[in-house]
Image (cartoon, coloured by chain):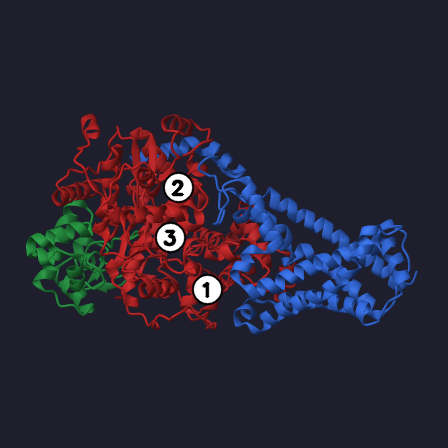
Chain colours: A red, B green, C blue
Amino acid sequence: MAEVDIDKLPTYIEIPAIQKDAMAGDGPFKASAEIQEQLGFPGEKIENWQQVAIEKMAETTSKYRSVQVFLDACVKCGACTDKCHYYLGTSDPKNMPVARQDLFRSVYRRHFTFAGKYFPKLVGAKELDDAMLDDWYNYFHQCSQCRRCAVFCPYGIDTAEISMAAREVMNVIGVGQKYSNQILGRINKIGNNLGMPEPALRDTLLDLEEEIEKETGIAVNLPLDNEHAEVLMVTPSADFFAEPHIDGLIGYAKVFHQSGVTWTMSSYASEAANFGMFIGSYEVMRQGALRIRKAALDLGVSRIIVGECGHAWRVAYSFWNTLSGIGGGASDEYALKLQRQLDSNYPQPQHIIEFTYDLIQKGILTFDKTKNDHRKVTFHDSCNVARGSNMGDIENGQFILPREVIKAACNHFADMPKATIKSSTFCCGGGGGLLTDDLIELRIKGAMPRMQALKQSQENDGVNTLAAICAICKSQFSKVLPNYDFDPYMIVSVHQLVSDALVLSDKSQTKAEDSL
Amino acid sequence: MAEILGAEIDEEGFLLKMADWSEEIALAMAAEDDIELSPEHWEVINFLREYFIEYEFAPAVRILTKAIAKKLGNDKGNSRYLYSLFPYGPAKQGCRFAGLPKPTGCV
Amino acid sequence: MSLTSIIFTLFCYLSLLIFVIGLSYKIIQYSRTPAPLKIPIAPAPLKRSGVFMRMVAEVFLFKSLFKASKWTWFFGWIFHWALVLLFIRHLGYFWPGDTPEVLLKTESFKYASFPLIIGLMGLLARRIFVDRIRYISSPSDYLMLILLITIGASGMLMTFALYYPNMGLVYSFAEGLVTLNWSELPSDLIFLVHIFFVFILIAIFPISKLLHAPGVFFSPTLNQVDNARKRRHISSWAMQKETDKEVSIEQNLEKDE
């Protein structure tokens, strides 16, 4: 358990009085020259960084309508000030969404607006000096880009867009974050965030196959690089490595086994996560998406399904078609080839929850719900799924489908308080490239609002299990739950609940094996 | 650059070069974290190193727990037990003592 | 014409000129800046009609603000609607010739000045007394409210407190601005303050946070349809990049194998 002083969970969340500089500091570890250069960024802070930063800001505002409009439109109404979990947890006023944006906006005003150029004091315009850059680095790495503020803003101003823009400006001048950029270097080289090479991945999957057979007596496959599979499964690499994630992976395997649909994972694209989004780089994000397109083409699959990963699903659902033509409408050679290859009877890409939900609707899966009777389950809406995606192509499907899947596998389900779920869900505290030990104090404090809601559910409904569909959420909760006197093992994958209750039948996957 | 017993470490205390590792370094790292390495700790550290040398990667927590169950008995083959040995996590703290790079990602 | 009248007449046109040019510039800028990615915020509509309903709810009801803070919503909403009613009520002054029947019926809209002032005072009080909002406020944020309060208060003094200016002169001055048949304006200080601040308000519109008015319509989180899986959304610059770099990207990927 990390040692951070936190108060006892309150009965209800009070909006704290501001405490200036409560979270002042140097921010997370900075990326080394080697890490920076792998991504094509300068190795260290460049000589003329101010000039380059301002030029990059000009480029960003001319390429992103979101950034341009959001910088102009804010009226400082204060609606967002009490909506950020990091503000509620730390009381630092610079963690209020508008104040965080203002770090960027004040520089924008100084350099790009009439009022800011000629009357800087009047409109709070500021120069991008060393102190400001330090604040940028510190506070734009205290934003998990969860977009809760945007739900409440009368103009839809999305702090995540500003925080991404700021991080990109910083990368361009050679000031990058070690955690995110190191991971991006690895995915470009090895194919996943962890840097897990193919033999280790293969061995892990074999080990899991043995485990399932030992426990259930039924052979369930976790295929890798199977060229004749229908489905390419792209899941966060945490599913291959971490607890409780790995039980979710077992759950996917069992669902595929029961469905009779052949599937495979790819050793070339063994990662759904795409940290390119966190650093605001269209190019880096596109590289990640193209890797998956290439894997799909090489393996000749007809469907692409994404595992339990929050921001991956936002990237896949909202951005893949734009970035790499996975979906309909792109016209380059490879995209056209992919369009011919993919089965248009299904949305492309699809979420594993959508896949499982469809099977449940069709009556293909049988559950013994009593297997989960020791659990009283609640569901944590992960921010990127909740606020940046959809499932099932029905309004609010991203809230409905996961809950329906849980209810199909469990007898006891209760939601957390209304103001803390669905589109108003509180971030786990570790998203957006902040899931790193050097930010542990922020992570623990930022989890407070979610923990408070969980405690209410524990007291009112006896909730003892927290289910999620995001690798970051799962890791973050495992880490911070004990700080709030919860059992760290109460966090599970939704597909672990599915896995535990699913009745398996012995249909060895002859199709897949024959074709190998 | 910081050092431990003459070996370079990064800002999070992980060895930069795996080849620099020695049992003394593991002991010194553990001492920094107020941990006295027991035979059980060494079983974990040795398994991590063996696995890493074969696969160039640390084992998944599940694989580690199963290996420990085989060596130390089923009652110890679970993540709760491993956390009691390595309060900062068997993967992260264990890898550090074993001289392996830190596993990071969504973990 | 007196010097005051000449100056105020020029002021009026100057502010309108800044307004029209500045606002057109910003609107063109917003519409020309691409939105490279689909970023609608939940609860996101899946169809165009849903976007329309969403914009109606935001623009007319301030729906998100209602979710966020009931007090801010209350003060902000009554202020904006009062402003709309008062704007309509003022149209009659500028109407050349006989004022149309419908504008004559807007006499009672003058009472909207009460909710206007209440709303503005409420917003000002929040800005002063709530520590979070005080923290995020710049001098311009206070001045904007003071400007509007002054306009409202001076208008009320003229309407309800018997500081009537010469209404004949008001009509001929206002009509003259429209018909370019300029004439003398009343020289009452309170009237001059009232219209001077209105001109200021018009002039600073395109260079201040008043840009929230056009901005809301261009906000990608609000105005996008959530259908990225079905229909490809791509910006001009990304498309350009794609066609320029297509081959090299595929080559890079080959190399990794």
Location of residue A31 in the rendering, given as x and y in whole percent from the top left corner = 36, 55
User: Label 2: chain?
Assistant: A
- Residue denoted by label 1: A95
- Residue denoted by label 3: A382
Please state which amino acid type lies under the numbered disc 1. Asn
Mark 3 or mark 1, which is nearer the start of the sequence?
1
Quadrant where the N terminus of chain A sits is bottom left
The label number, if any, that marks residue C89 in the structure image = none
- Residue denoted by label 2: A316
Mark 2 or mark 3, which is nearer the start of the sequence?
2
Please state which amino acid type lies under the numbered disc 2. Ala
The answer to whether marks 1 and 3 sit on the same chain is yes
Quadrant where the C terminus of chain A sits is top left
Judged from the image, the secondary structure of the residue bearing numbered disc 2 is helix
Q: Residue at x 46, y 44 (%)?
A: A395
User: Label 3: chain?
Assistant: A
Please name which of the two marks, 3 or 2, marks the residue nearer to the observer. Answer: 3
Q: Are marks 1 and 2 in contact (CB under 8 Å)?
A: no
Of residues A420 and A139, the one nearer the viewer is A420
Location of residue A360 in the rendering, given as x and y in whole percent from the top left corner = 31, 40
- How much space separates mark 1 and mark 3, taking CA atoms? 20 Å
